[in-house]
Image (tube, grey):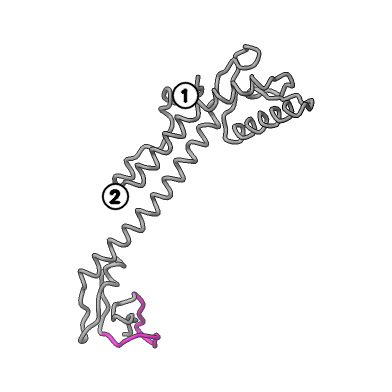
Amino acid sequence: MKAVIDKNRYFTGNYAEVGELEGSVEVESIPQETDRLKRTSYQYADGEWVFDQAYYQKRLEEGQSEELARIKAERTAQSKQNLKQYLETCKLSSTCHKGIEKQYSMTSEKQQHLANMILTATMAAQAGISYQPSWNAAGEECTYDWTIGELQQLAMEMEGAVRPLVSKQQRMEVSIQEADSLDELGAIDISFEDQEEANAEEIK
């Protein structure tokens, strides 16, 4: 039987009962561990396989650290995605436009578009250029009867509603990075369903 060992004479996991393999040595048997990490922590010396506990433990800890880092990145990305999805489903209730209470979307795209609308309208007013800003309530078409002041009020209310959510996501991220184990990581709540009230659909 041929078994392939690395330069430090640790079993690579590759072997052949017949034929030749590059980097292999003649052996009577191979480690029978079902766990690949344990199986490849055997070192071939003086015709025998010797399990290297220190080498195995080091590789185990390195693997756990890599796994922890990978899952931290995944959980962080998921917390951001959860916030995005939450903002897509929740609406801001406001009377900013003509004193009529309506619901307004608060997605990141809407926030950016609103900021651009205010900037454009303000620059036009300062330059003495005629420009009529517009906006729309959720599920409605844009109307061209908005004032800069109304848009600014909506922007401030929107910022006041979104900031606590962003802060919550940032706290989640800090907790994720501070976690020392997979169990601690799994216990971190990265949902937004408890904001205001369970499964809330509106932020007022």
Residue numbers of the magenta segment: 13-27
Which image quarter holds the N terminus?
bottom left
Q: Is 91 in front, or is 14? A: 91
**Residue at (66% x, 28% y) in the render:** 118
Q: Say left or right for 171 vs 142.
A: left
Mark 2 = which residue?
181
Q: Say left or right for 105 vs 197.
A: right
Is residue 23 on the magenta stretch?
Answer: yes
Secondary structure at numbered mark 2: loop
Q: Is 45 in front, or is 113? A: 113
Characterize the local packing of mark 2: few (<14), some (14-19) or many (20 or more) Cα atoms within 10 angstroms. some
Q: Say left or right for 3 vs 130.
A: left
Q: Position of residue 10 (x, y in %)?
A: 29, 77
The three-letter amino acid code for the residue at tag 2 is Ser
- Please tell me the numbered disc located at residue 200: 1
Q: Quadrant of residue 175?
A: top left
Q: Position of residue 185 (x, y in %)?
A: 33, 45
The three-letter amino acid code for the residue at tag 1 is Ala
Residue 103 vertical placement versus 49 (above, below): above
Among the two numbered marks 2 and 1 on one chain, the one whose residue lies closer to the N terminus: 2
